[in-house]
Amino acid sequence: MKVMEFVVKEMPSHYFGTEKQEYISKKLEALDDKAIQVLRMFYEHILKRMRELDASDIDVGSFGTRGEIWFRVHGSKMPQKDLPPLPSPYCDVLIQSLVMPKQRTTLLERRSLDFSYHVEENGERFRYRGTAYFDLDAVGMNMRAITANIRPYANYNFHPNITNIVNLKHTKEGLILVTGITGSGKSTTLDAIIDANNNSVDAHIIIIGAPIEYVHSPNRSVVRHREVGRDVLSFKDGTVQALRQDPDIVIIGEMRDPETIMSALEITDSGHKVFSTLHTSSAVESLDRIVGEVPPEEQERVRNRLADVLKLVVSQKLVPTLDKKRTLAKEVLIVTPSVRAAIKNGNTGEIYQMITEGSALGMTTMEQDLYRLYRSSVISIDEAINYANNKKRIRQLINKKVN
């Protein structure tokens, strides 16, 4: 706290917004490494407490936290009364101390910064994904713990058809999407798929992330990690550059803008296997989102290209369980000839029924999977309904059982 107080004590009272953050940045640059290390050790003590509670996220800084430290534990976000308060602008100092000078410049220019952070303790390395951003003239931050161990692919219990699609050994090209809201485990699923390929095929895997989360040790494959903002300027640049790097598999952390979407379709068109994520809650919504992201005059062409290259969409949610933990519920769409025709013709509304009837192939709707979890006494009826995309359909499935 003394270092934070030293940085802010002479700050002019009329400074606010960017001026205030620039002042803090300059003060931090003038500090010696020992002072910066003191700040980081203080924060790493908080991260240790986070690990002890098995928390997935930490939120600090700005008006919205009331000067408290918040953890998300098993889905619920709560202030930690046993940890010291961190009022602004002390938290502004702490957050800026966690990143390098160039990253501070990016934060000041863009008002937001995605970054990675790691801690080594007793021979173990713990990695975190951070997002710092401006909030009412202060800086707030969310930091998410990255799972230290990859969840084994076998634990997902995917149908053999799904395994054949995601594994380079069986399917050499095509676009595979993993979708879901923030915190739904998309990155964990992608890492499991990467690991399965890394351990089973002789190939070159390029991962473009913002930031890079889990670092894969090369096994049977060469694995490259390119962090946006550190190793490459953007997802689009990383995707375009990957074409010249002799890849077999390209992982695009997120298709977040039209340029990245078009680049992903182009690299898939060229015969590569591409995995990416979208912030959507269903397979059909994912298709509509991709087409809707491009200008109207481009939509028919994108729709046709998407139909030709798309192989699989897995849309997932983490649902609270009866034992106060969380479990994975997923919707799975395989692009069959019928699905491909529906995409090309703009009839995506027909695809939900195709998923419903495609269980023999390995397809399932979110409602069918929630119903399975409910019948297995893993989740409650209320959670099954709350997390369903189609409330009418989940109620029909539940009432069918009751009757």
Image (tube, helix red, strand yellow):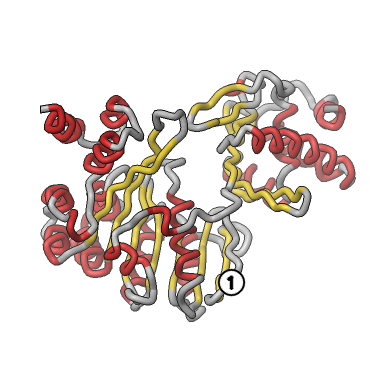
User: Is 66 above or below relative to 224?
Assistant: above
Image location (x, y in percent) of residue 341: 12, 63
Comparing 188 with 141, the one in front is 188
User: Is 79 above or below relative to 206?
Assistant: above
Q: Which residue is drawn at 32% across and 46% down?
A: 330
Is residue 343 rendered to the left or right of residue 96? left
Q: Which residue is drawn at 76% across and 35% down?
A: 45
Image location (x, y in percent) of residue 148: 60, 51
- Using the rendered image of the protein, determine whether residue 3 is visible from the camera's viewpoint: yes
User: Is 38 above or below relative to 64?
Assistant: below
Question: On the image, numbered disc 1 is attached to which residue?
Answer: 218
Q: Which residue is drawn at 85% across and 32% down?
A: 3
Q: Which residue is drawn at 21% across and 64% down?
A: 307
Image location (x, y in percent) of residue 390: 20, 36
- Using the rendered image of the protein, determine whether residue 140 is visible from the camera's viewpoint: no
Q: Which quadrant holds the N terminus?
A: top right
Please tell me how crowded label 1 is: few (under 14), some (14-19), or many (20+) other residues with Cα within 10 Å. Answer: some
Comparing 145 with 245, the one in front is 145
